[in-house]
Image (cartoon, rainbow, N blue to C red):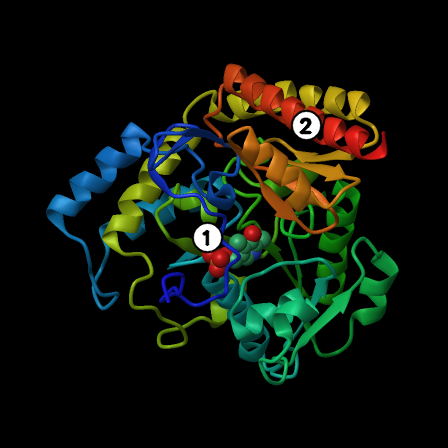
Amino acid sequence: MADATPLYDTYARAPLRFERGDGVWLIAEDGTRYLDFAAGIAVSSLGHSHPHLVAALKGQADKLWHLSNLYEVPGQETLGRRLTQVTFADKVFFTNSGAEALECAIKTARRFHFAKGHPEKFHVITFEGAFHGRTLATIAAGGQAKYLEGFGPKVPGFLQVPFGDMQAVKDAITEETAAILIEPVQGEGGIRPVPNAFLQELRALCDEYGLLLILDEVQCGVGRTGKLFAHEWAGITPDIMAVAKGIGGGFPFGACLATAEAAAGMVVGTHGTTYGGNPLAMAVGNAVLDVVLADGFLEHVRDVALVFRQGLASLKDRYPDLVEEIRGEGLMLGVKTRIPPAEFLKAVRAEHMLAVPAGDNVLRLLPPLTTTAQEAREGLARLERAAERITAATERKTA
Ligand SMILES: *Cc1c(COP(=O)(O)O)cnc(C)c1O
């Protein structure tokens, strides 16, 4: 069969084949240029082929690719030191992906209580609409039926409460609770920012009951919201944080960050990974931080975000029958549509622009953090043409 693919059928892939990337642009095999306001899914944080990242990867490739964690890995020490200097954390564990960063975070929280003589405290409270990855534990943490179905018993120890419901969180706390796990801005769930006051209250609740606060900043971290990490907007710090996506700028890796106290149970032999923190990943990660931590970079993100956001607000005003709401923070924005987001995305793609559908009828816009104001305006123009395309088609139908 000509159309049979050797690949698992797990993805509904668009018939687009890209060959090269250049900044905010992806170039298809036929030469068509697409404005990439998806950046993978918030992964290519500095756009495609960023010269500093390319140089870092090539430089490391010439020297050494792999080192076992049986040995000291200097790139891990450097990146770990830098991450702890600019965050709440004292300790870092490097992984290959977001889900593994979450696995490490969950294990760290459980071990914390175990080491204190409370093995019964292993339950984690999570929120409806959450997404934490696709491993057996992280689908249990995410709690979405569509990801759990058919994969055997749900991993025990995860209890889900409605998004934004503080009373439900309080009611869910028992003697067995170890931690509360939350994305400061839900990504997959539809770009739903958690109000600052809610995060502050969670922090206070964790302190009161001796629970650990775990933040999943896999999607919203590393400059995406205009702060290095999204929780900074709320003026709180977690005990443990999972990071991935943007931190690698397209090179696959993640990290679990923790305070020394929270990580106290993770002693020799309790956790490990073959590839996590390998020299190639560390070289790229250090290069990403060079750019993101440079003077004025986050300010740039906030400035461009303002331009983009204002444009989106005006799109909503001009197409009220199509756009219900604009939401998000920084360059993590969502357009809630009155039609299925996949339909809106189709029109956006017809304008040679990429975005990502999410839950709650939202189309996610996650442009590279290096996007200029002019490129943001180009994106707005394409969204406008897509909106016009849909409106015209609807009018034809109803005429
Ligand atoms: C993407 C994502 C993950 C999972 O990351 P993978 O690298 O796909 O395992 C976890 N949490 C959030 C918030 C994400 O967006």
Pick whichever of labels 1 and 2 is earlier in the sequence: 1
Among the 4 quarters of the image, the one containing residue 255: bottom left
Query: Is any part of residue 98 visible from this angle?
Result: no
- Using the image as rendered, state which of residue 317 and residue 90 is in the foreground: 317
Inspect the image, locate mark 1, and give the three-letter code of the amino acid beneath it.
Asp
Helix, strand or loop at mark 1: loop
Disc 2: which residue: 389
Q: Residue at x 54, y 25 (%)?
A: 301
Residue farthest toward the left in the current orientation of the protein: 62
Residue 48, percent across and down?
A: 37, 34
Q: Is residue 376 above or below residue 271?
A: above
Residue 152, percent across and down?
A: 59, 84
Residue farthest toward the top in the current orientation of the protein: 374
- Using the image as rendered, state which of residue 384 and residue 47 is in the foreground: 384
Query: Is any part of residue 151 visible from this angle?
Result: yes
Residue farthest toward the right in the current orientation of the protein: 167
Q: Residue at x 32, y 33 (%)?
A: 49
Inspect the image, locate mark 2, and give the three-letter code of the amino acid beneath it.
Arg
- Using the image as rendered, state which of residue 208 and residue 287 is in the foreground: 287
Disc 1: which residue: 90
Residue 193, percent across and down?
A: 71, 43
Q: Residue at x 66, y 34 (%)?
A: 329
Rate crowding at label 2 as few (under 14), some (14 to 19) or many (20 or more) other CA atoms within 10 Å: some
Among the 4 quarters of the image, the one containing residue 173: bottom right
Whether residue 363 sits left or right of residue 96 in the image: it is: right
Whether residue 140 sits left or right of residue 84 in the image: it is: right
- Using the image as rendered, state which of residue 372 and residue 83 is in the foreground: 372
Residue 178, percent across and down?
A: 66, 71
Query: Does the Cβ of the disc 2 residue fall within 8 Å of ligand 1?
Result: no
Whether residue 268 sits left or right of residue 159 in the image: it is: left
